[in-house]
């Protein structure tokens, strides 16, 4: 899925106008001298062309659509008991709005419809996983989703049990709605694998997750790996308390039952 670093500024994404057009969203127009910079929707969409051609097509064999309403994909793997819903939280970002992260409701609805159809074809017994770039929960100090409730509620309503994201450059672990087994949603945020030092929180190492699923999809173990010195080796990041001891472990377990 694309993130903020996949958005490439396009010179013609905005056009200079002497007078202010009416009825445009706040993120589509900016004051510039005596006039206004107005977003050119056709050119603006080209910001994800490099991601589409150089990453998505080699991986999936098809270009990533530049129409934001179509930027929701489904990867169903019935042989593994898994289904992934792949969403774009960076479609509104540009040089003027670096923090306007959100998931377009139309893209989410379209992808969910496709996911439901594939789930029915697979017999309806799959672990459903949502994947997007920006963190779900709101935080005034971070570039997080501006519409978290829409995403969270739709995924919970559709029986998704796991959400995966990146962006925050530190590991996150949340359990939403834990009091209701039918709609509870686990959120796991990955640390940064290769951020420059300036993009890292103080004393936070480079991190990545390795996810291991039980064959029946009832549980998952998240192994956290860390590089704690520059150009050093990778090792387990033993920060998680164990259930039956005072020790810390380099993994934690999630049950979906």
Image (cartoon, helix red, strand yellow):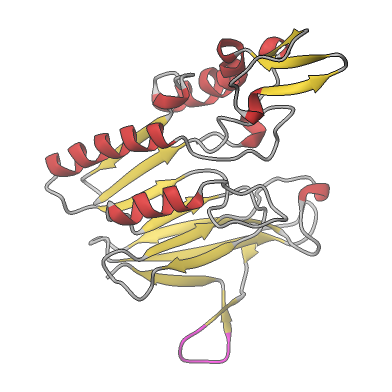
Image quadrant for the C terminus? bottom left
Q: Quadrant of residue 78?
A: top left
Q: Is residue 133 above or below residue 52?
A: below
Rendered location of residue 238, percent (x, y):
61, 74
Q: Quadrant of residue 18?
A: top right
- Is 243 magenta? The answer is yes
Q: Main secondary structure of the magenta part?
A: loop
Q: Residue visible at 60% across and 22% down?
A: 24
| Left/right of residue 134 with respect to residue 244 in the rendered view | right
Badge count: 0
The residue positioned farthest toward the right in the image shown: 33
Q: Nearer the viewer, residue 223 or 115?
A: 115
Rendered location of residue 47, percent (x, y):
62, 20
- Span shown in magenta: 242-247
Q: Residue visible at 27% across and 66% down?
A: 218
| Left/right of residue 209 with respect to residue 176 in the rendered view | right
| Left/right of residue 89 with respect to residue 59 in the rendered view | right
- Is 155 magenta? The answer is no
Rendered location of residue 138, percent (x, y):
59, 56
Rendered location of residue 82, percent (x, y):
28, 49
| Left/right of residue 36 with respect to residue 159 in the rendered view | right
Q: Nearer the viewer, residue 211 or 112?
A: 112
Q: Residue visible at 83% across and 48% down?
A: 198
Q: Quadrant of residue 122?
A: top left
Q: Is residue 239 above or below residue 244?
A: above
Q: Is residue 134 above or below residue 66?
A: below
């Amino acid at each position: 899925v694309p993130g903020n670093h996949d958005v490439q500024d396009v010179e013609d994404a905005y056009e200079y106008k002497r007078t202010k057009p009416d009825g445009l969203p706040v993120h589509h127009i900016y004051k510039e001298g005596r006039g206004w910079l107005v977003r050119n929707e056709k050119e603006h969409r080209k910001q994800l062309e490099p991601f589409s051609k150089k990453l998505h097509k080699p991986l999936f064999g098809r270009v990533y659509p530049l129409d934001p309403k179509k930027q929701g994909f489904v990867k169903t793997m019935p042989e593994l008991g898994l289904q992934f819903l792949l969403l774009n939280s960076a479609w509104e970002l540009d040089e003027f709005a670096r923090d306007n992260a959100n998931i377009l409701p139309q893209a989410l609805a379209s992808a969910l419809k496709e996911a439901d159809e594939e789930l029915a074809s697979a017999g309806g017994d799959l672990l459903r996983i949502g994947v997007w770039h920006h963190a779900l929960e709101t935080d005034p100090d971070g570039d997080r989703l501006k519409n978290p409730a829409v995403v969270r509620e739709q995924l919970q309503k559709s029986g998704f049990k796991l959400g995966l994201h990146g962006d925050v450059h530190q590991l996150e672990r949340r359990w939403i709605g834990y009091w209701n087994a039918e709609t509870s949603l686990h959120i796991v945020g990955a640390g940064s694998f290769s951020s420059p030092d300036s993009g890292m929180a103080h004393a936070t190492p480079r991190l990545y997750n390795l996810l291991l699923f039980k064959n029946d999809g009832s549980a998952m173990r998240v192994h956290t790996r860390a590089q704690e010195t520059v150009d050093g080796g990778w090792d387990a990041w033993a920060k998680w308390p164990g259930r039956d001891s005072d020790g810390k472990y380099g993994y934690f377990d999630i049950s979906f039952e």
